Amino acid sequence: DQQVKQNSPSLSVQEGRISILNCDYTNSMFDYFLWYKKYPAEGPTFLISISSIKDKNEDGRFTVFLNKSAKHLSLHIVPSQPGDSAVYFCAASDPRLNTDKLIFGTGTRLQVFP
Amino acid sequence: NAGVMQNPRHLVRRRGQEARLRCSPMKGHSHVYWYRQLPEEGLKFMVYLQKENIIDESGMPKERFSAEFPKEGPSILRIQQVVRGDSAAYFCASSPPVRGLYGYTFGSGTRLTVV
């Protein structure tokens, strides 16, 4: 049962343009969403998060949008840079579980080309 | 301030052997999580531990896998009698008691190869 889905396994964007990475979820009880970035042979690093009481959170070039009615969130990177090339995972937290585990999507590989 | 330290980075085991993966959380972090990433898949939760306690092991396979986080020393993920399907990247993460808005801090992972 994949509660967090990233349906695009890969995305290719030209440097300077906007990258939009999408994530869908099925569990309406998720209260907290995060994006992680992962380079090869490294662990994931936290990028940005959003609480379910908000619909937008911005940090520099990165903005996360949350559409609760559609159970959809997206990560916008603008302008995209070659160093942004990595795998991006979205993750969600369910407060009912009384545990702090995060449920991850399968990831989207972003390639930013010159 | 060192991050989450995992060792070894790479581990090769023959089928039937035991694998021991170690994780030292960040200083001040008392919560440890283990995740597994199979080839071409996302990160799958395995277990959540606090010092001397297993809080949530709902993602652990029923057999051959165990985890501990003793009062002193690193957290250990132990896989007995490894099989080829155990080949994966195993990531440890840690967080303070109140995780807040910043998620976990992950280590660089241990890549287990079973031959």
Image (cartoon, rainbow, N blue to C red):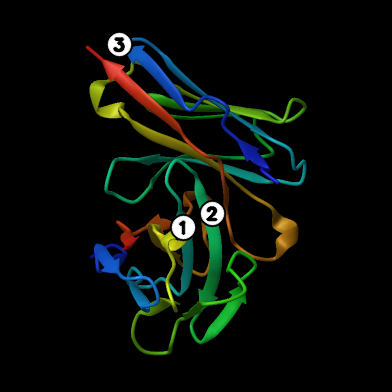
Q: Residue at x 55, y 40 (%)?
A: A105
B102 relative to B55 in the view: left or right: left
Mark 3 vs mark 1, CA separation in Å: 34 Å
The kind of secondary structure element at disc 1 is strand
| Residue labelled with disc 2 | B44
Circles 3 and 2, Cβ within 8 Å, touching? The answer is: no
SS at mark 3? loop
Q: Chain of mark 2?
A: B
The residue to which callout 3 is attached is A16
- Is B107 left, or right, of B42 in this rendering? left
Q: Residue at x 69, y 53 (%)?
A: A94
- Eyeballing the image, is B58 above or below B44? below
- Would you place residue B7 above or below residue A11 in this image? below
Which residue corresponds to mark 1? Answer: B36
Q: Are marks 2 and 1 in contact (CB under 8 Å)?
A: yes
Question: Label 2 vs label 1: CA separation?
Answer: 5 Å
On whether disc 3 and disc 1 are found on a single subunit, the reply is no
Q: Position of residue A37 (x, y in %)?
A: 38, 39
Q: Chain of mark 3?
A: A
Chain bearing tag 1 is B
SS at badge 2: strand
Identity of the residue drawn at 40% across and 29% down: A109
Q: Amino acid at mark 2?
A: Lys
Between B111 and A4, the residue placed more toward the observer is: B111
